[in-house]
Amino acid sequence: MVAEIEPSNIEKSFLLESLQKGIRVDGRGIYDYRTLKIICGPEVGLVEVQLGQTRVLARVSCEVTRPFPDRPTEGIVQFNAELSSLCAPGFDSTGKPSAQEVAITRMLERVIRQSRAVDTEALCILAGEKVWTVRIDVHFLDHGGNLVDAASIAAIAALRHFRRPDVTVDGEEAIIHDVRERNPVPLSIHHTPICVSFGFFGDGGMVVLDPNLLEEQTQASSFTITLNSHQEICAMNKAGGIPLDSKQIHRCIQIALAKVDEINEKIKEAL
């Protein structure tokens, strides 16, 4: 179960009054992102992302498995998101996955796997017999708000940082080489999808980029756009009851396009 500690009505009122004046309680501008740090290693496929007070750790691993019967020439990409009491006092890691863990996992599946960011055909070893299953585990260490953006950055950076063992195929036999004997090889990544989230307040007239935890707990709606460096929209997701008009959506897309370029540069520098 997840039982977040809700802010008081006074805190929410103060935040809304500040936003009406164009001021955010953490001192940022309306369309400012928090400080982003990306730390890779020491193992391949291990990436920590710090977005303000939010910290996320993504770890990529792989193993040889049988492919799905309806996709005999494609490897498998799996995601798992985990929130624990280490992340925030209100989270409980016991029992079945929480609704928020499931939602983040599905979001990662949608923006990375379903957008075909990873070349799954390149993960095939022997058609119908052996493929690589790549697993991305996302662990949240600190919850300072906007977990989705931090998770997407960590996951795609970890995939780009990861190296799998090299394989030699001889007829019907596949030899998996030890990484100490032969250099491992990177995954084939088609593009780098990045989530950029906005929070809407009141009747939708007030909007902020990269909401922190207090802003998330006060917002009336959230809107997440996923774009890549080719300026392609990979996914959009809206939660909450406030309707958004075309002008608001277009404005968010323009802001997100600029932000995605900055984030991609951060990922390149870290790698």
Image (spheres, rainbow, N blue to C red):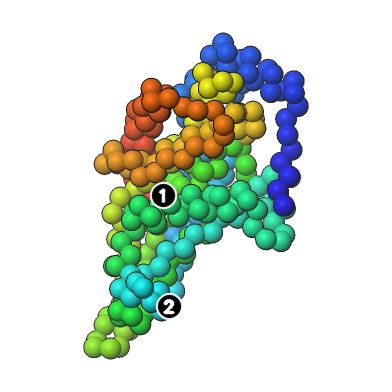
147 up-or-down from 254: above or below: below
- Residue at the spot 54% in from the left edge and 37% down from the top edge: 239
Pointer 2 local density, CA inside 10 Å: few below 14, some 14–19, many at least 20: some
Q: Label 2 is placed on what type of residue?
A: Thr
- Residue at the spot 40% in from the left edge and 68% down from the top edge: 76
Residue wearing tag 2: 65
Residue lying furthest left in this view?
171
In the image, which is nearer the foreground, mark 1 or mark 2?
1
Residue 111, labelled with which disc?
A: 1
- 85 to the left or right of 113: right
Please state the horizontal and vertical placement of residue 12, each as a whole percent of the image: 69, 23
Pick the residue in front: 58 or 3: 3
Q: Label 1 is placed on what type of residue?
A: Val
- Residue at the spot 70% in from the left edge and 48% down from the top edge: 2
71 up-or-down from 88: above or below: below
Residue lying furthest bottom in this view?
172
Q: Secondary structure at mark 1?
A: helix
Please state the horizontal and vertical placement of residue 14, each as a whole percent of the image: 68, 17
Please state the horizontal and vertical placement of residue 226, each as a whole percent of the image: 40, 41
